[in-house]
Amino acid sequence: MLSFYEKAADDSGYIYFHKYEVKNSPAQSATMHFHDSIEFIFMLQGESLVRINSEEKRLTKGEIGFSNCFDTHDYKPEKGAQYYVVLISSKFLSSYDFQAYTFAPFIEKTDGFEQIRAFLDMIYPIWKGAEDNFRLGFVQMLLGLMTRLYPLKEKEKGKAAETMVAALRYINEHFFEEITLESLAFAFGYSKNYFSNLFNHFAGMDIREYLNRRRVIEFMKLRNSSPDMPIYKAAQACGFQSQNTFYRAYKKYADVVKEK
């Protein structure tokens, strides 16, 4: 996954359902990202360190991680881990008010998990190539089971989390412009040091690293779509002000910002 706003997850009709089996160690991580979709991780076997916003927990067999729309999250599965990941675009959530209510980010193991697993195990072999009505039925059935077994609770409002989501969205929309810690802190009404600490705690990396990763990702996309464009022009178009800065960032991040 990408360490930035995952736009594909917001496209109309987007439902993602995949089973992961980690055979290598260290496993490839799903680095910090967010999107306008809800996301579940259902642990079937082994362990995975999961971070959702500023909370972190090592999930084990039978436990569930839940990220609400625009929650930042990442996974670090251990060798031997098996888990399902399900993403559901907000466009399919009209029957559920996930702005006001939510599941807990980390759901402990209960007897109900086996019902969820049985349902996912039944659907997964026939998921590929499923028609739209089938996919919509899958969403309604899964959410129906989840809300029956794990009731929703009122969502707590947090100014810090809302600020960080707004900051991340701003960076992802203006990455090609000059962005500094000072300008962001001023725009959101915080001191530079406080905003820096808040961002680091929330995103798991500092602003410069997040911004450079984002720019490298856009550079790689631009080069794929326009291979004849000179490297220095593509780098400038993605917000890099100097070639030295670009080369350092590319060398550091190119191998870790690949799409799943």
Image (cartoon, rainbow, N blue to C red):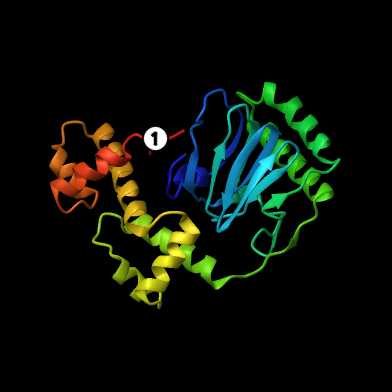
Q: How many marks?
A: 1
The kind of secondary structure element at disc 1 is loop
Q: Position of residue 41 (x, y in %)?
A: 65, 40
Q: Position of residue 227 (x, y in %)?
A: 20, 31
State the image quarter where residue 257 is shown.
Answer: top left
Q: Position of residue 4 (x, y in %)?
A: 42, 49
> What amino acid is at disc 1?
Lys
Up-down relation of residue 238 to residue 195 (above or below): above
Q: Give the class, few, some or many, for how many residues have Cα within 10 Å of label 1's Cα (few <14, many ≥20).
A: few
Residue at screen point 38% across, 57% down? 206
Q: Is residue 84 left or right of residue 8?
A: right
Residue at screen point 46% across, 54% down? 204
Q: Which residue is mark 1?
A: 258
Residue at screen point 76% across, 38% down? 62
> In front here: 74 or 88?
74
> In front here: 171 or 52?
52
Residue at screen point 70% across, 41% down? 139
> In front here: 199 or 39?
199
Q: Is residue 106 left or right of residue 33?
A: right
Up-down relation of residue 60 to residue 193 (above or below): above
Q: Position of residue 142 (x, y in %)?
A: 74, 41
Query: Farthest residue toward the right?
Result: 111
Q: Is residue 53 left or right of residue 140?
A: left
